[in-house]
Amino acid sequence: MRKLLMLFVSLGFLALSAGAQKISGIIKDQQGKGIEKITVSLLRAKDSAAVKFGATDKSGAYSIIAPAPGKYFIRSTSIGYVPVYSASFEVASGGDVAVPELMMAKAEKVLEGVSVSSKKPMVEVKADKTILNVEGTINATGSDAMELLRKSPGVLVDKDDNISLAGKNGVQVYVDGKPTPLSGTDLANYLKTLQSAQIEAIEIITNPSAKYDAAGNAGIINIKLKKNKAFGTNGSANAGYNIGVYPKYNGGFSLNHRNKKINVFGNYNYNKSKNNNSFKLYREQLDTIFDGKTTMAFHNNSHGFKGGIDYFATNRSTFGILINGNISDNELNSDSRTPIVYKPTGVADRLLFANNRNEMNRDNVNFNLNYRYADTAGRELNVDADYGLFRIKSNQLQPNYYYTASMPNTFLNKAIYRFISPTDIDIYTLKADYEQNYKKGRLGIGVKTSVINTGNNFGRYNVQQLKPEVKNLDVPRSNQFDYSENINAAYVNYNKQLKGVMVQFGLRVENTNSTGDSYGLNADGSVNKNSRQTFERKYTDVFPSAAISFNKKPMSQWGISYSRRIDRPAYQDLNPFEFKLDEYTYMKGNTQLRPQYTNIVSLTHTYKYKLTTKLSYSHVADIFVQLVDTAEKSKSFMTRKNLANQDVINLNISYPFMYKNYTAFVNFSGNYSHYKADFGGGSRVVDLDVISFNIFMQHSLKIGKKGWTAETSGWYNSPSIWGGTFESTALWSMDAGVQKTVFKGQGTFKVALTDVFFTQKWKGESNFAGQRLIASGYGESRQLRTSLTWRFGSNTVKAARQRKQASEEEARRTQGGGGIGQ
């Protein structure tokens, strides 16, 4: 009877196993061979709790019976190897799950915990974002954030350092999860002070959920700064030297102490550089030709820092304090020579020499208090309070000297100006995000309020004498501009795994209240309160989002998504006063500039977790771009206007490849754009169909067993349209570098040559409003760059707790932590 009962039990188990779902995969070493007897753990994604265990066979393969439907990930561990984690995946009823192949690296040294020496892939493509891992990329050595964005997949940076993504402008740039309030030249100059030694990764998010701010028509670019996560006391020191036309230096250090209750961290980086640029501008307007040539030198002296403390009060509660910032002293010197030609005869009658000197101080400091609560029932609360400040000072001397064009050059007259323009920006933010399990799904709600106060004083002085300087304020052309923007937001987001389908719906509501006050100045530079001109805007917008993922077949997954987004004008774009570039060119804002709105629909397919194809359509209403228009017959000004509508179709294809010691990543982004606008007929009509594409490639090869790695990377931008009217030619570049581990694995030495073939030279043409422009230029793009990094102290990570705390930190940073961000 007993034998009969055992027979029935055995048959029952066999029947159950035969009908059960399986989670399977394979684990290999760095040479591509399967590893036997690796412990495989199936962990629940929400709390990292172990659900089931298994082990690999002689070929490195494993198979685990799937538990209840839900979200899980795989952890593989073995003595002498660095632990490896898979990406999270969904287990749904009715189908097996094939986990992508995992590769385990030999541990350099085994201590009490596990010594981590693994390396992230150069580029990661996830469902909601693309990640460029700057920290481990050889060719990122000695670069600044603006240069890294220029080389990022799918990102385009034009001649004026305007950033576009997937064929659209209106990119919102974040630093450590916090949106920067800067745009245009201010944003570009700020990004040039952030060095690659400070940056861990760049996240490119083209379709953010309702949890993120609605700002950013093209999406979000988040620059993540470094933060050490290792236990014990540890740190690193780095130094670099670059040489192109001029030498450049950088260096820094980081320190970290972590135990079960606290994590104290900090880092500092210094950069001193001088960069050369050449620029040509040929302009035809009515009967006059201006043929200018300019040489520019940008001096940068910057200090970047970050510090904070995390206190793990309980297993559920964490308190944090964070401060980071960047202090920079910059100087931009430009020397230009412009022959002024009478077009009917083709003869130059004057020469204009304009030698500008602009001293700029750009300081940014951010303070954050944060709290996080998470329990085993899936409830999670994040609260953040932030204050950030930007202090920008610009002091520009612009002497303009006119000479006869015929030899010998005879002095005719001069016009010398000084522009003094300080800007103060203060940002206050309070936000809270809450998530919990609800009806077999995940419900998230949140609120946020933010206030940005900006004050800009623009003083234009006529200089009668340089040494000693004698000047007087040009009162009609000087002003004080104060701008305040308050945004109050609330959102709800819900996602649920159904049978073979994951659904996500979100709704965000944002109420915007903005006020701009423009004042004239008195002769002594004080503000004339009686001259106030003001404008006020109040509006409320609704931003829905939705995504459906068909994941019944894990090796071939489809997804469709929709979102609505906004891009509000920056304060600089609303300031109606002019900023003079030279005697014939100036910039001014537009108080009538309206927000631009974008509706985006995307279709995504992922094959074998590697080949990702995304097709998206965007309609942008009231798009604003920078245009060069005419004034006073022979003068031109640059301003932003709402350029009617734009339709964009984007196709993005990416593929990572790995074989033994060789890894590669290829990304193709193609765009079709249709611009249509009418500003009064004739030459003031813009009706363009534009097809453009961008290719990004990166290759890495580990050479031998002595720590050598070689890397090449490159990008190509096809001919395109910049700013709605400027037709650019193709642009491409390639970098190459090598890396060697030194100091018994505790150090890394890198050497890279950027723009190997010196092809990063832009050129383009515009014909708008009776004005024809031909512009070209190049910078100090070809450089030899070296860096040395030394790591010291503990390199040990307690695997289980580190996994949990690292995920908590990631949640705080990308979902709200440190967070003016969402």
Image: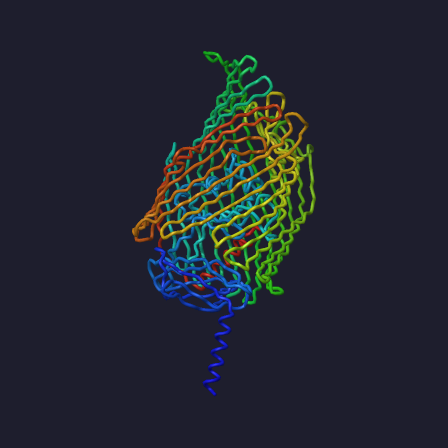
Decide which of 281, 72 is in the foreground and name it.
72
Decide which of 301, 446 is in the foreground and name it.
446
Figure label count: 0
Against 687, residue 152 (above or below) is below
For residue 584, side relative to residue 55 (left or right): right
Q: In which quarter of the image is residue 801?
A: bottom left
For residue 704, side relative to residue 201 (left or right): left
- Residue 163 % position (x, y): 53, 39
In percent of the image, x 53 and y 25: which residue is there?
774
Residue 460 seen? no
- Residue 8 % position (x, y): 49, 81
Against 588, residue 797 (above or below) is below
Which coloring applies here?
A: rainbow
For residue 754, side relative to residue 528 (left or right): left
- Residue 529 % position (x, y): 67, 34
Q: Which residue extends farthest bottom?
A: 1
Decide which of 94, 140 is in the foreground and name it.
94
Residue 728 seen? yes
- Residue 767 % position (x, y): 58, 26
Against 788, residue 356 (above or below) is above
In percent of the image, x 33 and y 58: which residue is there?
108
Decide which of 612, 260 is in the foreground and name it.
612
